[in-house]
Every structure is written in structure tokens, then in C-alpha cells.
Amino acid sequence: MFVVVASGNLLWSRLIGHNQNRTTNNTNNPNKVNKNQKNKKNRTSHAVQEYDLILQHDLFTAGNVQWFYYRVGNTRKHSIVKFNLINMKKSGSLFGLDKDGGGMQPCVYSQMDAKTKGIGWHRACTDVRYYHNSQNYQTNNNNYQKKQSTLSFVYQFQHDDDCVFFAMCHPYTYTDMQEDIASIRSDPERSKHVVFQSLCNSIGENRIDKLTITSRSAAPLSMNGKHLTALERMRKERDKKPKRAIVLSSRVHPGETNASWMMRGVLDFLTGESIEAQGLREHFVFKIVPMLNPDGVINGNYRCNLSGKDLNRKWSTPSKWEQPSIHGMRSMFDKMIRDGRNIALFCDMHGHSRKKNVFTYGCLRKKGHPSRDQRPLKFPYILSNVSHPFSFMDSRFKVQRSKSGTGRVVGWRGHDISLR
Ligand SMILES: [Zn+2]
């Protein structure tokens, strides 16, 4: 007997069938399935249970369902379960791209495997499919009806009495972020490059952290062989041109956990002692907000905050009370510009649900425009030459009307900030 436990953002589950005979080769890896299908000796027959699962909407919205995270308890060794997540809202997905049930797999975490084999979150499951179902749903802002989709996949449990978690992507929680920041703060070598501040609090009263990373070199003791007095050094320090700024943020969309994993790598790199990190700290000041939407992360949302709004459509006129993190970012940009600081780059990290590779969405005026500036192409082009996973060909630079409230477009139009 299985129990699908309502946790994470699972609203309810219903057993819809069981005792169908299914032939299996005891693996959750579709690649191995294909190889082992020839070896009939390894194949055994098991009963299959099938569950329909309904996921919670983003709080105070009528949709935005794509992220999933739930657990299954009271498992039986070798038992097979087919899960149907029947109220997904996107029409397409990286799940089930291949006709044979391959493509991206869900992430799985078995408490037993973690304890006995040290196996953490990993991609698993077979027969992964993503398709339109017969149900429609009403979109948030009008009466437009859209088709819902189903994500289905099959998992064979490996232990009795295990507790197994399933998620869309490797989870990264608000607590994970706090622990990562605490780890930097407690490291005397890394923390000396960082100023830890709060950008503001979220609606749910969760702290939104801001980290400033740069080198702290003071004015030199001497110049051209001449010793500088304390007053001269102070004046030099005061008159120094402010370093150019690079602003990085992530996790405005709570379900895009891959953005947090990228940000984790960035923080690890920028606080490290590599020559490249030292050079970057010497030339730039990094303003970093690792989690713009902690309430959404904590509550299992996919896209919105607690005001039921997509924060990445609210950059034009953010409310201090309903979108405090975006309001805080706008204030931070305004202050840097007032202080005469040039903002060289603003990069808000996301995870795309349908596109492969790593790529950039930038801003560029239309071809033929008299003030078309090609500089936003430079950074992604250089990146594609030094980093294999980054694809310049998958990058886009079109400014669509529907994206006018995004951070990149508002920053580009209002503050002349872009990738360059
Ligand atoms: Zn996003």
C-alpha cells in the first residue's frame, strides 16, 4: 500500500487504478531500459498503481502551476507507481520530449538511498510524458480558456518503508540560501570581500539579502616615489572614480531553482581567490540579490509572490508594499546612478521550462534604428566562446511589448542598463 503524502505544493492525490501487469527490468533510468530490453531474463512482472495528482495554484492566483514537490511514504520494494500530474498549465515542457517517453526526467530523492548509499537528488523515472488533457482552465486576467496539460511518469520504488520525494528540478530552499550566505560570512577569507545587508523585507516578513562584493584596496601609501600624507590619501580616496557596478539577481520566479544553483556558483566564484575573481573584484563592485521572491519559494509557488503577481512584470511601477523586492531593486539602481556609478551589467537569472542550453535575453533596438547599440551582443558572444554550455545562437535580443515590465527592459529603457 502506498500513501502519497500531501506535502510541498501537492493539493490532493487519488488512486485511480492498480493491478495492471507491467513488465519491468527494475530500473528508473530510461537509457538502461532500452539496453536491457533485450535481456528478457532480467525482466519481471509487477502490479502498477496509478495516481492522479492535483497541484496547488500559486497562492492568490488561478494558475501558474508547473513546479511540483511532494513525497511518497510507506513504500514497498520493487512496487511500481504511475503518477499523473493533471493540472499543469504550460502547453509544452522539457519533460517527455522524446516519443519513447524520454527527455527530461523528474528529480527524485530517496531517504533510504541517501542514508545507506549517499545518493542525493538525481533525475530518474521512466515513461515520462507531457501532453494536453481534456480539461480547460481560465487564465488570470481574462475569460480566455486554455488547455491544461498532464505530466505523467513511472517510478519503481527500491526499498520497503522508504520516504521518496519528487520535484520538477533540484530543490533549493530559502534555508539553503541562508546557509550558503552564513557559510560565506563565517569564512574569514571569503567574508573580507563582502558586505552583508538587507535589501528589504518581503510581504511575508522574510529578509531579502543583498551582498556587495568588491576589493577593499585603499589609496596607495606612496605615488611616483613620493610618500603620501594621510590627508593626501584621504583626498585620493574621495576623488577616486566609483568602480563600475555589476548587478546580479535571481529567483524572482520561485520554481526556477536552477537560477539559485547558478547564483550559488557565482557567489562561490566571486568570493574565491582565483586570479579572475581578484581581477573582477578589483575592477567592479558586485551588487547581488540572490533571492528576490523568498515568500514564493517558501510557499511552493512557481511564478508569483504573495500579492499573486509575477514580480518580473512589475518593474515599471513597483509598489513598495506589494512588490517590495522590486521596489528595493529600483531604489538601489536609482541610488547608484545618483552616486555617479556606471552600471556595466544587470543580469537577472532564470530557468526556462522549455528551452535547452544556457542563454541570454537581452535588449537591442530594431535593425536600422539610428541609435541601435550593438554592445548588448558583446557579453553573450564572449561568454559563448569561453563557456561550452552557453549558446549565443539561443540568445534573443528582441524587446516584446509583453516583456515591457521585466527587469531587463525597464533597466535598459529607464537606466540605460543592459548587457554590455
Ligand atoms: Zn523566470
Image (cartoon, rainbow, N blue to C red):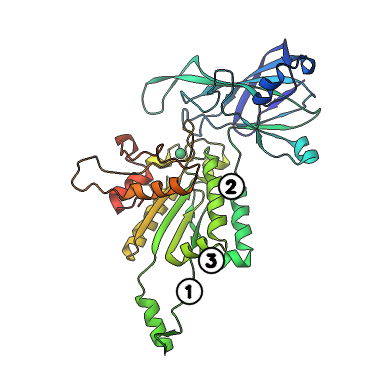
User: What's the amino acid at mark 2?
Assistant: Tyr
Would residue 206 be seen by someone viewing this image from the given angle? Answer: no
Taking depth in this image into account, of 56 and 49 the one nearest to the observer is 49
Residue on which disc 3 sits: 193
Residue 257 is situated, as x and y percent measured from the top left of the image, at 55, 41
User: What's the amino acid at mark 1?
Assistant: Ser
Residue extending furthest toward the left: 370
Residue on which disc 2 sits: 174
Would residue 50 be seen by someone viewing this image from the given angle? Answer: yes
122 versus 87 height, above or below: below
Q: Is mark 3 on a helix, strand or loop?
A: loop
Q: Residue at x 50, y 43 (%)?
A: 388
Residue 366 is situated, as x and y percent measured from the top left of the image, at 24, 40
Mark on residue 217?
A: 1
Label 3 CA crowd tier, 10 Å (few <14, some 14–19, many 20+): many
User: What's the amino acid at mark 3?
Assistant: His
